[in-house]
Amino acid sequence: MLQGILISAAAPLGASLLTACGSGTPGQPAGGGNSSGRKVINFWSQQFEDWQSAWEKKHVAAFNASQSKYKVELSIVPADAWAQKLKAAQAAGNGPDVYTISYGNIGSAVSTGSLVPLNGLIKSQYLDDIDPSIAKFVSAKSTPSSSLKQYAYPWLVEPSTVMFYRKDLFQAAGLDPDKPPTRWDQLPDIAAKLKKGSVYGLGTASVAADLSWSSWGLQQNAAEHYPVKTDWSSADPTITPYAKLAEFYSSLYNSGGMPKQALSAYADGTPLGQGKLAMQITGSWFIGLLRQQFPKLESKIAAAPMVSIDGDQTRPTATLGGWTLAIDAKSKTQDGAADFITYLLASGQSVMMDYFKASGWSKYAARTSIVKAIDADSAAQADPFRKIITDKIVKYGVPEATYPIDLSTDFATAIEKSMKGTSANQALATAKQQMNQYITSNKLAGTNTQASVQSGS
Amino acid sequence: MTGAVTGSTGRGMTELPRQAGVASAVPARRGSRKIAGRRRHRDNLIAYLMLAPVVILLIIFVIIPLISAGYLSFFNWSFYRASEYVGFRNFVNVLQSPDFLASIGRGLLFATMVVPTVMILAFLFANIARGLGGRIAGFVKTSIYIPTIISGVIVAIVFTIIYDYSGGVLNWFLGLFGIQPIAWLADPSIALPALAVPEVWMMFGLTALIMLAGVLDIPDSYYEAAALDGAGWFKQMTYITIPSLKNVILYLLIANFTASLQEINLPLLMTQGGPLNATLLPNLYLFNHFTQDTYQGQPIAGALLLFIVLGAISASIFAVLNSEKAVDG
């Protein structure tokens, strides 16, 4: 009797366990799902600003309403959960059909065969509309002998290094708000002058995790190339320009104008909006934050290109980061996924113009036709930040480094060590040893799928 | 047995009734043995059935992944292309990585900061709480248990706010005495101790309650006898309390040591392993490689090596404390 009860109780438990274990992350494998006779396209997007999520939802619904063949299911994933969720899903064969991928990660995704080339899936007229300088960011060779193909469709670009400052605090410190500093050696003194009470003069990255990617623009500014060779065969961060870069960061950190512990992560411009900083180096995305959360401060804040090693502001100071959409190589609905990308990013102007308007013109277009449309838009023309950032920063922007982030972290650790007391040369010598050990251990030489877009040493 | 009974049939007549009784009892015993055997069989079946869900879960979530991880650690595991067999290269790479070895050393240092502090505080609390009665005891026990049920993520956020350089509660308090702000999470020399504080706070509640249960389990007669013999508080603690808590201390040492060595929430959310890797604990090292590496073999090899380290530490604690005697006692 008891046995019977136990067995009948255990059976549904076991069944439910097996059912639970058998279900994939969102409940179905990549593509091939079916919803009311329509093929399901799983679209995973990293979570960005609220207005961007609203824009995504609005246009996914519009796409679903526009045709009867496919149904896009949007999943918005928080940034801090993104990498592990995507990798776990891909390992289990449950990855999304379409997903957001940053420019810097396209190369490694191509090297592992994770992405399908868009040539042949998206009409060439739409691929040709991509700004030629940005088309390089999404182009790669899956093997050294393969032809160059486009593996993602650019969504936007945004410079990762912009100098934002409070004009009123400049005036209060006896500085001319219309003449922001242009050279590295001017910035520490200005940061010190701007420090008043609990308001610090300058905020920027000061730990390796932030410096690893936010210093790329200044690495290019100093040496006009990255410390890793284009073919990823070796690294040499010990050259003089990089020593000067490390010393520059050290001079900022020890100027007295910068807090010893960053008031926020590099990407978060909140301290400037809160009035805790007089200047903050962060990405152009701060403009969106400023307008959404601190609108009263907008008239008091100006943007300028980051200071340059020698004051020449035609040298690059920022990388052009940003996001693209790519199609998973295992997707069973690649045609539908390509149709969706075409609808959202590549064809017409209304959808993308709606996006850039919603961004408050704080993002920058990657398509030639959209750039022209924005230039012709009176509201965009009147935007005080857009012209400076487009003409003085985006114009000279460079692609992000595409080699593994561990190498950038080793380099950034040298900068951080220099900020915290170690000599620049000694710190960079250690970085050189670590970077080359990583390259050897992981057999990186010759594995760069984007050698044609990198400017290595 | 049966043969022995039948072999006695040559004895006197007087024995016959007994023999007859014995003979008639044999089938009865056989029957009762059969019943007992069936009962045992049924009990075993029930036990196996009750164990089955746990065993199935262990197989699915521990045994199979462990075997699978061991297998995959010999490959450059790719999700999209055929994985490349690399032999022991992933293990060699991990062992040659100064960051991994340093993270293990740092994890041990972190555990050394946290575990003795928690154990001493919990022991003191248990001895104080033992003397409390009624509502006060209930209130105190509930209060100290609260940090245990708070998410590690929330704790990390709360302490990040406390340690904030400009506007943090701690620097504000120090500022009242004219002390300049301290970069609690950006100074490599103090970042790890700064993370040890919330770790102690989180671990203290459960450790203290388990310690209290152990203290309450010690019979009062031990202390009464010791007091009659003139033993004071210190001798009672040394000769009665601590030896009687040996099992509890052993469990708490192993559980807390492995938990603090594996801490990831606090460094991930509060410092991202910085400054200058000063808070890069082993699991965060592995997590970073899991999320950043192009191939997954190396993080898996690192995880297996960490598993060996944790096992070795647990075995060492067992060996030092000579647990068998205590468990039997």
Image (cartoon, coloured by chain):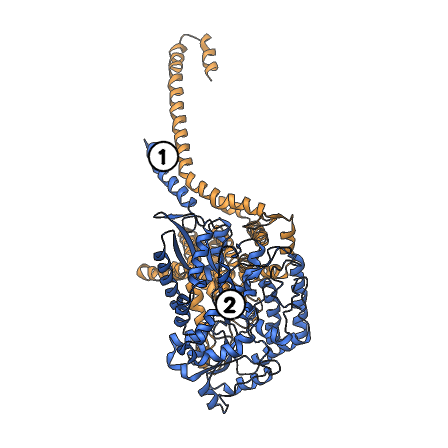
**What residue is at 46 percent from the left and 56 percent from the top?**
A338
Residue topped by disc 2: B271
In the rendered image, is residue A39 in sight?
yes
Task: State the residue in front, A98 or B222.
Answer: A98
**What residue is at 60 percent from the left and 82 percent from the top?**
A312
Mark 2 to mark 1: distance in Å?
Answer: 51 Å
Chain B display color: orange
Chain A display color: blue
Of all chains, the one bearing label 1 is A
Residue topped by disc 1: A7
The image quarter containing residue A6 is top left
Q: Position of residue B316 (x, y in %)?
A: 58, 51
Q: Is residue A252 above or below residue A34?
A: below
**Residues under numbered marks 2 and 1 in contact, where contact means CB atoms less than 8 Å apart:** no
Going by the numbered disc 1, the residue's amino acid type is: Ile
Q: Position of residue A404 (x, y in %)?
A: 59, 62
Q: Position of residue B95 (x, y in %)?
A: 64, 55
